[in-house]
Image: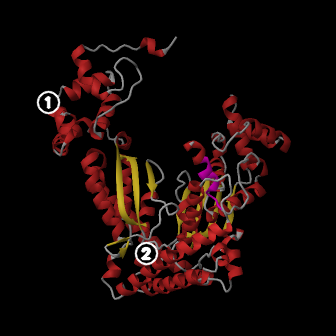
Amino acid sequence: MSFIEFWEESLTEQEGCLLQPFMTNLDKSVFGLMNLPEVVKGALFSRYSRSDKSLRRILLDEFIKAPECRFASIVGEAANNGDQLVAIQQAEAFYDRVLIGYGDDSVAELGGAHIACEGISNIASIALVDSRLGLSPLEKSTRYVPFNRKINGRYRYHRESSIMASSHFSRYEATLDNLFDTYTALIDPLLSWVQATTPQDTTTSVRAYNSATRAKTLDLLRGLLPMATLTNVGLFGNGRAFEYLLVKLATSGHEEVRALGYVMQQELDKIIPSFVKRAKTERGLKAVQYLQTNCERTELLAQKLLKPTEKHSAMPRSAACPEDLAQQHRAPSTVQLVEYDPDGEVKVVAAILYPHTEITLNNIKEYVAGLSTTERVEIISTYVGDRESRFHRPGRAFEETYYTFDILADIGAYRDLHRHRVLTQQRQHYSVRHGYVVPIELEEAKLAETYRKALDYAAETTELIASHLPDAAQYVVPFAYRMRWRIKLNLREAYHLIELRSSRQGHPSYRVIAQEMYRQMSAVHPALVANMHFVDLNDYNLERLAAEQRIDMKLR
């Protein structure tokens, strides 16, 4: 017997004709909404939670047939031209009345929007991707897209307003032009070297080989790209997430990021106005002031307390010789497990057993503490089961124990790992204090000296500007320079991050981080990490080749 047998919807033929454009079906209890603006869908679902009517009946009675709703103007013929925006704005008061009885912030999750942010710096793009929940970002790739195209004779990087208004503007442009000139000049010789050292075999297509070698070349050169590099970011999210994002953007120390938030607010007001309006109300302004004040006060206190320590922890910009640089590139000391739970194994095993008993969690923990290692391993292995791929992820019991890592690595690696959001991340400022990384392949191709000269010049410019404009100076910092950040994540997310980021097609700079995280976790919790079967500890010449060959198979 199916639950659908108990469902019944009484619609007249005329009502069915009215609803048909907006429903995936009219005769089933499970259906989707189509062709409706976000503001309508959000208000519709808000009423849904506090009404005995079906969703179809609410749409008919309280929206389609309600004159003040102006429903026909919003989704009818006017939906195909600019009049729709006017209709939505005029109808907003009606939807506000629908939503007024729903004070909970979760109502703002009922409306969503797609937003494109084009021509923004990497400072701004990372600020967008900082949000952990409610937003799904997608950014232009430095692996598949070269960043050396000019527009009107100028490279595409952000001309930061305070720098351009200062005496440093000519040095700023000269430095960034030099970075992009170097990037451009090295592409062809490095691509030739990559292809010469990894020749095409008979099993690889020309398309796959060219894609893999070009990706390898751009991977090796991305360290020259400065934080000012312009990129594109697409975002999909719900109103609640966008509202909080707008508040956070307004607290940024970068004028570009604050301006971006203002423009996003204007565009979101055209799509989901009822769900992001609080970002610009008195409540939103007070939230901005609260975050700004706390950040400024904490920064001043930290500088006062930790400034002597920072002086001793600073590192030279680069190593003295190529061998040192090559070692730095793969140095495991860049990843440090600074905190883990010694009782993690007991907590995880207890969480595994908990849903299958009727006794208290404390009693289960006492029982698990008395088990032998062999017995615990059996429980863990049974719970994880036979994992055939990394997509077979352990259950929520693995969320019981956490690990905190302090990582020192190049900004390029940070940008990739920053995309993981089911964890806690905090970064320090983008700077040149910790030196830079030179890929060993550039040393072998005899191109490292040109690479170093551009990075050294960028460091001098960064320090020069930082003496007057410390926040703005971060735009000059190239991706090759190291930065420090911390990650706190649970065991379940560690399985996902480590197995994904250690895979062959990953960039070498973050593969080594994932591999070292695995080694250090294995040392403290071997039984919990034993089922992490899909960690790849190997090195590869063409990381993308296997993935491109799989694409060939799909194309065939």
Residue 303, position as x, y percentages in the image:
50, 78
In this orientation, does residue 372 appear?
no
482 in relation to 280, above or below: below
Q: Is residue 328 magenta?
A: no
Could you tell which of marks 2 and 1 lies nearer the N-terminus?
A: 1
Task: State the residue in front, 194 or 478.
Answer: 194
Q: Amino acid at mark 2?
A: Tyr
Please tell me which residue is depicted at 69% across the width and 70% down the height of the picture.
Answer: 330
Q: Amino acid at mark 1?
A: Pro
> Bounds of the magenta span?
542-550
Q: Main secondary structure of the magenta part?
A: helix
Left or right: residue 67 compared with residue 299: left
Front: mark 2 or 1: 2
Give neighbour class at mark 2: few <14, some 14-19, many 20+ (Cα, 10 Å): many
Q: Is residue 548 magenta?
A: yes
Left or right: residue 36 compared with residue 438: left
In this orientation, does residue 162 appear?
yes
Quarter of image, res 152: bottom left
Numbered tag placed on residue 475 in the rendering = 2
Q: CA distance from mark 2 to mark 1?
A: 53 Å
Label 1: which residue? 67
Residue 446, position as x, y percentages in the image:
64, 80
221 in relation to 514, above or below: below
